[in-house]
Amino acid sequence: MDFKNFLGNDKIKSNLSRLFDSGRLPHAILLEGEDGIGKRTLARELACALVCRSGANAPCHECAQCRKAEKGVHPDIYFYCPKGGAGSFHVDTVRDVVNGIYMSPNEADYKIYILCNAHFMNASAQNALLKVLEEPPAYGIIILTAVSKAALLETVLSRCAVFSLEGVDASSGARYICEHNENAGYDEALEAMITFNGNIGKASQSLEDGRMKTVSRYAREICLSLVSPNEYDLIKCLGALSKERQEISEVLLLLKTVFRDAAASGGAVETLSGQEQAVEELKRRFSKEKLLKLCSAADCLIDAAGKNANVALLITKMSYSLREAIGR
């Protein structure tokens, strides 16, 4: 298979290619990974390959079938993506899938259903899906995407081949972003890729909406407030943070990288975070032991932010945890 639009995850691509080329691609596939990691992109690439008429190195991205798939108008590729939260993937939608999949394909050899955000299915919706997972038609392929397989019933998981996606190499991702966004500079794209742990989707979005500059500024100011003798500086800095949990999470991710840079760097300042001034100040002020404690504190805070903690309490916890790490 030719994964033209999907970067990284070479082992997964190799496994899928081997299964595809041997005609043993599972009828039910679950792609799991955080938002922005590329689940939908890979799902669409698989669907495109399944309808492609070129033969070798599918998808060719040139035949009529591929062009229809890429434009989202292929009659044998169905795409469902609820826009709500938990429980928004309704059982009625799943029933439509179950009823439709047993009708023969229109043009292709396969009929592909891409069900995004399967973690939004409640138990009723997942149980309704079991019928088609247990007795699929020979031409039927269902591709589920989810943030985590833990949100799905064991009965569903046991009938799916699960592939866990990871972030890509930061430099490769930065080049990809620059190729697809003429307004993005390589250095800022690289900083975004590092901040978001190789997540191209999140990195790209942060650059498009200007959020990356805000995140970098907050991270730098928090680091400088930590080395300030005035303890009020940290409280003031954290108090200015956005009340959006997503932005706080992004600041914490960058802070973790800055702390690691400071703990790991030797005489010369060589940073992954791009925050040379902050790294130098942290190194000058704190021992390696305290810097490692800051790394651990950032890890715990990232975990807390991911659990939908109250924003006001999260900011309070940030103040306490960061101060505790440096012995204040």
Image (spheres, grey):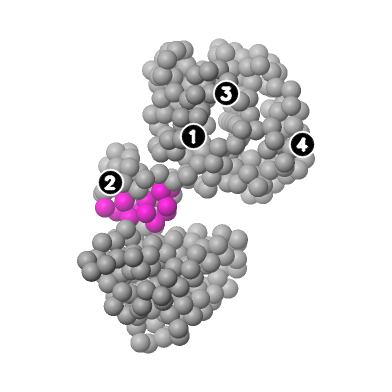
The residue under label 1 is: 12
Instruction: Locate residue 175, reporting x and y percent.
Output: 29, 42
Residue contact between numbered discs 1 and 3, judged by CB atoms under 8 Å: no
> Mark 3: few, some, or many residues within 10 Å (few <14, many ≥20)?
some
- Main SS, magenta residues: helix
> Mark 1: few, some, or many residues within 10 Å (few <14, many ≥20)?
some
Is 303 placed left or right of 95 in the picture?
Answer: left
Amino acid type at circle 1 is Ile
Front tag of 4 and 1: 1
> Residue 25 shows which numbered tag?
3
Instruction: Locate residue 128, reporting x and y percent.
Output: 76, 33
Question: Is 159 inside the magenta-drawn segment?
Answer: no
> Residue 127 shows which numbered tag?
4
Q: Which residues are magenta?
A: 187-199
How far is mark 1 from mark 3, CA to CA?
13 Å
Residue at left 61%, top 33%?
161
Instruction: Locate residue 165, reporting x and y percent.
Output: 50, 41
The residue under label 2 is: 183
> Mark 2: few, some, or many residues within 10 Å (few <14, many ≥20)?
few
How far is mark 4 from mark 1, CA to CA?
28 Å
Query: Quadrant of the rendered structure where residue 308 is?
Result: bottom right
- Quarter of the image with the N terminus is top left
Residue at left 52%, top 21%?
20
Residue at left 77%, top 36%?
127
Question: Which structural element holds mark 2?
Answer: loop
How far is mark 3 from mark 2, CA to CA?
39 Å
